[in-house]
Amino acid sequence: MYEPKLKLVDENTDLRNIKPYDWDLVIKDEPYYVCDLEGYYHTIGGHYGNNSLWCYPRNEKPTVDNLMQFNGIPVRWGFIVDDNNFKKFKHEPEVLHNHMITIIRNGKVFYIFPSSGVAYGAGKAMEIIESIGEHALGFNTIDFDKKMIGRKVWWHETPAIITRWIEGQACVMLEPDQTGHDTKIKFPVPAYFTNEGDEDEEDIKANILDKHIWWHRD
């Protein structure tokens, strides 16, 4: 049985054909590429098993001097719980309390939602982070916000395309896909929102967790 041995990068390592992964690694606001140098194991065992992953600054070419052993994670996800008192004016003015949960991606705000309690909010945040990791829009990849533009999806039963990513809100802007249609199509207003005089919508803002979006459309 073959057992790999430790082997580090040196001046004789061929670095000409490195193909980095699309992981969005950011270290102290500096973006990095992660690559696999097959055979150059710096760690035996641990999170990645026999680990030959290395990283280097995204604005530099890989060299023996800037390559670093990688035992980190591709994207840093976390959340912050913040207590809030807020005013509400209904019959009489009153002060109410809730928690705001902020999901963080690589140190930046990704999504904010209210919660009635810390335990529920923390559990919900972990659930969302797990689902984000498996999302069709590839939120762990470099330039995910650019790659999604023009993607074909379904909004309810209407063919649509993504036109914009709204940072900090985990939302996309959708427009009806006019391809193959002689007349301009719009998103129908849901029946429970319809009032007299309401018109169908030309675009719509939708949360990425919305169950009415089907992300795969040929």
Image (cartoon, rainbow, N blue to C red):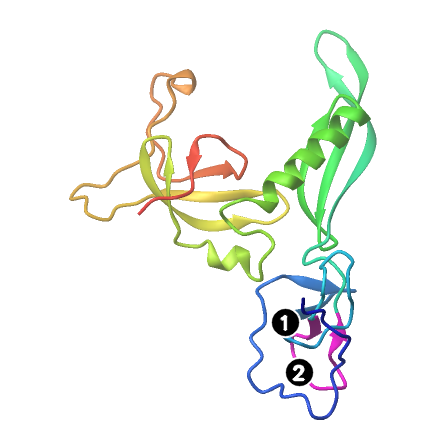
Please provide percent x and percent y for residue 153: 38, 43
Is the C-beta separation of discs 2 and 1 under 8 Å? yes
Q: Residue at x 53, y 39 (%)?
A: 208
- Residue drawn 65% across the image and 74% down it: 58
The residue under the point 70% across, 11% down is 90
Q: Nearer the viewer, mark 2 or mark 1?
A: 1
Q: Is residue 13 left or right of residue 138?
A: right
Instruction: Pick out the residue farthest to the top.
Output: 91
* Quarter assignment of residue 127: top right
Q: Secondary structure at mark 1?
A: strand
Residues at marks 2 and 1, CA–CA distance in whole angstroms: 10 Å
Q: Local crowd at mark 2 within 10 Å, few (<14), some, or many (≥20)?
A: some
Local SS, label 2? loop
Name, please, the residue furthest toward the bottom. Answer: 12
| Rendered view: 155 above or below 5 | above
Q: Is residue 124 magenta?
A: no
Residue at mark 2: 62
> What's the magenta region?
53-69
Quadrant into which the N terminus falls: bottom right
Mark 1: amino acid: Cys
Picture disc at residue 35: 1
Q: Position of residue 129 (x, y in %)?
A: 66, 41
Foreground residue among 87 and 72: 72
Please state the horizontal and vertical placement of residue 167, each as a whole percent of the image. 60, 49
The residue carrying pointer 1 sits among few (fewer than 14), some (14 to 19) or many (20 or more) residues within 10 Å by Cα, namely many
Q: Does 94 appear above or below 28?
A: above
The numbered mark, 2 or 1, whose residue comes first in the sequence reads 1
How many marks can you see? 2
- Which one is in front, 70 or 142? 70
Name the residue located 60 percent from the left edge and 43 percent from the top edge: 132
Q: Amino acid at mark 2?
A: Pro
